[in-house]
Amino acid sequence: MTMKLLRSLTFLAVVSLAVCACAQDARPDSSAAMSLDTVPPAPITCLEARDYVDNSDAGDKIHITWSLSADDGGGMSDVASYQLWRSEGAEAGWDSLGVAAAGQTSYLDETAEPGVDYYYGVAAFDGVNYSEQTSFGPVAGRTNFFQKTRVSVLVLMLVFFGMVLVFTKLAERGADLFVRRIPGLNAIEEAVGRATEMGRPVLYVPGIGEIDNIMTIASLTILSHVAKITARYETPLIVPTARAVVMSAAEEVVKEAYAAVGKPDGYNPDNIRYLSDAQFAFAGAVNGIMLREKPAANLYMGAFWAESLLLAETGFEAGAIQVAGTAMVSQLPFFVTACDFTLMGEELYAASAYLSREPKLLGGLKGSDWMKVLSITIMATGVIIYLLNPDNAFVAWFSSQ
Amino acid sequence: MTFIWTTIGALLTLSIYSFLYKDNPFYKFAEHLVVGVSAGYYLVIYYFNFIHPNVFSPVFLLRMGGEPIGFGSFLWWMALIPGLLGILLYARFFPKFAWVGRWALGVYVGGYAGLGISPVMQARVIEQLRANAVSVAGVEDPFAAMTNLALGVVIFAAMTYLLIVKRNLGTKNLLAKIGVLLVSAVMGYAGWWVLSLISSTGVVSLTNILLVVGLLGTLSYFFFSMKHKGLLGGLARVGIAFLMVGFGASFGYTVMSRVSLLIGRVSFLLHDWLHLID
Amino acid sequence: MRREIPLAITFLIGIFMLVDFFVPHHVVSSSAEEMKQWGTIIIAASILLGVGNLIRVHFHKIRRRREGWGYSITTLAIMAIMFAFGGPWGTIEEGSAFNWMFLNMQVPLQSTMFSLLAFFIASAAYRAFRLRSAEASLLLIAAIIVMLGRVPLGQLMTRSWPEAVQLPNMTEVIMAYPNMAAFRGILMGAALGVMAMGLRIILGIERSYLGGEK
C-alpha cells in the first residue's frame, strides 16, 4: 500500500516535470544543504507569461505564472521571495520588474508597452543567494479593438438610437406625435406674464453646470424660448451664470432670440452676467440680485448642487413665482418644496422638445418612451429567466459590462 | 497676524449671517468681496494649473512635465492646438470673427456629448435594471419571487385604482390636515406591519414588491407620448407617490449634514476666533 | 460654412469619444485622454471671457452711478489685488498673500454661505407642511421619519415599539426601497433624456449652444 502511494507520487512528479519541459539544471546537491549561506535555492519551474485580458484591456498587462521552487515549502524550505526581471529582447539587458512573496506563483506586470515583445526572468531568493534564473519569452501585450464585455451596452444603445431616429424620420414626414402636457412649462409663460404685469424683471439661472453638461444645454434651449417671450413682452431678462462658456453661449442665445422676434434693440448685454466659478459666491450674488433687482419670476433650469435651496428659499421669501427644472436627483426635493413648479428629471430634457414643437425633437421623446417599455420588459424577462436558470447565458450577457 | 486674518474671516462670516435678518450693507459688501476674490483666484489658478503647464510652457519650448520638448514635435502640436482653440474663444471680442469661437465649443461639447452617452447607458440604465432584477429575483425560492412579481402587479393595480378614485386627501383646515396626516401615517404603518408579518413566513418579500411597483410607477410618470389618463394616469400617480416619498426621504436625510455645517461655522466663531470654547 | 464647420467638428469628435467606451485599444484611449485635456484647457482659457464680462458689467454700473455702484468698486478692486498678488509675476504658494486671501476670505465666505442651508432647510420643511396635496403629505411624512430615524432622539422615542415600526428601522426600509425605486426611475428616465440629447448634439440637430445663425 505504502509502496503504491510512493510509486504514484514519483510518477506524478516525473510526469509534471516532463510536461513542463522547462527543467533547468539539476537541483544542487542536497549534501550542500548544510552550509546554508552559500547554496542558492532551487530554481522555479513552469514559467509562463501571457497577455492578460480584463475589462479595460489596453494591452499593458502581462500575467506571469510559475511553479514554486523545490525549496519553497519543501526541500531546504528557505525561499524568502521571488525576484522578477524583464527584458525587451533575448539579448537585451534585464531590468528589475518586481518581487513576489514566497509561496506566490503569479505576478501581474501592469507596465508593459502594448505590442512590445518581452522576455521575463524569475529566480528564487533565499535572502542571500539567487537561484538560477528561469526565463520565458517572447510575449507581447495585445490590445483589443473591442471590449466584448460591453456588447450589451452597445446593443441597447444602438436599439435606442434606432428608435429615436425612426421616430424622428416619421415625425419629419408629418406623423402626428402627441406629447403630454408638462405642467411646469405652462407655468413658465404665466410667470413671465406676471412679471410683465408687475413691471419687474425675469431671472433665469441656467445652473452651475459646465456647458459639457447635457442639462446645461437643455437649459439653453429653454432659455431661447423664455427670451423670445420676454422680448415680445419687453420685460428685462437677467441671466446670471457660474461658467464663462455658458455665459457666452447664453449671450448668443438671448441675442438671437431678441432678433428672431424683431426686437434686437431690447437686448441688454449687461443682463447676461458671469458672477463666479465659486459655487457659493455665485449663490450669494444671485441672492443679491433677487433682493435688489426684485425679479417677479425666477426660473432655475439646469444642473444644480447644494446651492439649489439657497436660491429657491431666497426667491420664495422675495415673493417671486418660481419654476425649477433639473435632473439632479439630490436637489429635486428642495426645488419641489420651495418652488411653485418643478420639471423633474427627464421632464427637463422633454421640455426643450415640447417648447420647440419641432418634429425632430418630438421623435426623440417617442423613442425614449419605447425604450422605457423595452427596459421594463427586459427586467421582467430577466427575472423570470433567472429564476428558471440562474446560469442562463442571457443573464450573464446582460450582467457583464 | 493670524488673529487679524481670523478676525477678518469672522467678521465676514457674521456679515453673511446678517442676511438671515435682511439684506444690508454688510452682506452686500461680503457678497461683492467674495465675487471679486474668486474672480481673481480663478483667473490665476486656471492659468497656473492648466494653461501654464500644458500650453504656455511646452509651446514656448520650456518644459513639459520636467521633460524638454522639441519644436514641431508631436507633443508640441498637442499643446499648441488646444491653446489655439482657447484663443479662438476670444474672437468674441471682435464681433466680425466671433463665429470661429464655435470651433472650440464644437470640440468641447461634441467631445463630452460622445463621452457621456455610453457610460450613462451602462450605469444608469443597464445597471439599474440589473440591480432591480437581482433584488427581485434574489430570494432563494423561485416560487416566492414569482409571487412577488404577481403581488407587485396586484398591489400596483389596487393602488392605482385607489389613487384614481380617491384623488386628494387635501383639506384647508390645519387641524383636519394634521388629523389626515396622522391617520394616514398610522393606517399606512399598521398595514405595513400586517404585511411584514405575512412576509415573515418567507413566501412574500414586501420590500421587493415595493421595488417593482416603485420603478414601474416612476417610469410611467416619465411617459410623455400618451395622455396621463386611465391606466397610465393611475400608474403615473403611483409614480408620483413614490417620487414624493423618495424626495421626503432624501430631504430628511440631508437635514443633519446641513446642521453640522452650521455647527462647524459656530465653532469657528467661538473657538478659533474668540477662544470661548475648547 | 460658419455653421457647418463647428457642426462637423462636433460630429467627428462626438463619434470618436462615443466609440472610446467600447475600444480598449491604447491608441484610442490615449487620444480620448488627450481630448479631455483639451477640454480643460478650453475651459481654463474661457475664464478670461467671464472676467471680461464681470469687469464690463461692474464698470457700466460705476460709470452710470447705478444703485450700489460703490460695491462694484469693491469687487473690481479686490479682484485686481488678487490678480496682482498671484499673477504671472506673483506667487501662489502656501503663505503667500494670495493664498492668505483665499484661505481667509473666499473659504470662510463660501462655507458660511453653505451653512446658511441649515436655516433654509428648516424653513423649507415648514413650507412643505403648508402644501395642500396628498403627495406633499407623503413627502412630509417620509421626511419626518427619516430625519428622526437618523438621530438618537428618534431611537429613544420608539425604543419600546415593535421592531418593524421603530424609527431607525423604518428609515432604513424607506431609504432602501421606495426611495431606491423612485430614484432608479428618475435616473433611468433622465439617462434616456441625456442619451437622446447627446445623439441630437452629435448629429447637429440640437445646436442652441452654438448661438446665432450669423
Image: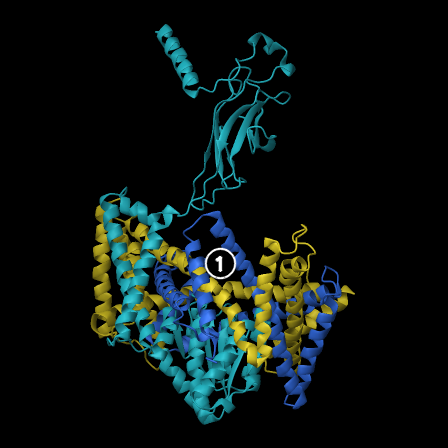
Residue C147 in view here? no
Out of A290 and C44, give the one closest to the viewer: C44
Identify the image quadrant of residue A326.
bottom left
Looking at the rendered structure, the secondary structure element under dot 1 is helix
Q: Which residue is mark 1?
A: C152
Image chain in cyan: A
Q: Residue furthest right?
A: B1
Image chain in blue: C
Identify the image quadrant of residue A292.
bottom right
Q: Mark 1, chain letter?
A: C
Q: Is residue C189 above or below residue A362?
A: above
Q: Residue C171 location, x and y as percent?
A: 40, 59
Q: Is residue C53 above or below residue B41?
A: below
The amino acid marked with disc number 1 is Pro
Q: Is residue B171 left or right of residue A326?
A: left
Identify the image quadrant of residue A346.
bottom left
Q: Colour of chain B?
A: yellow
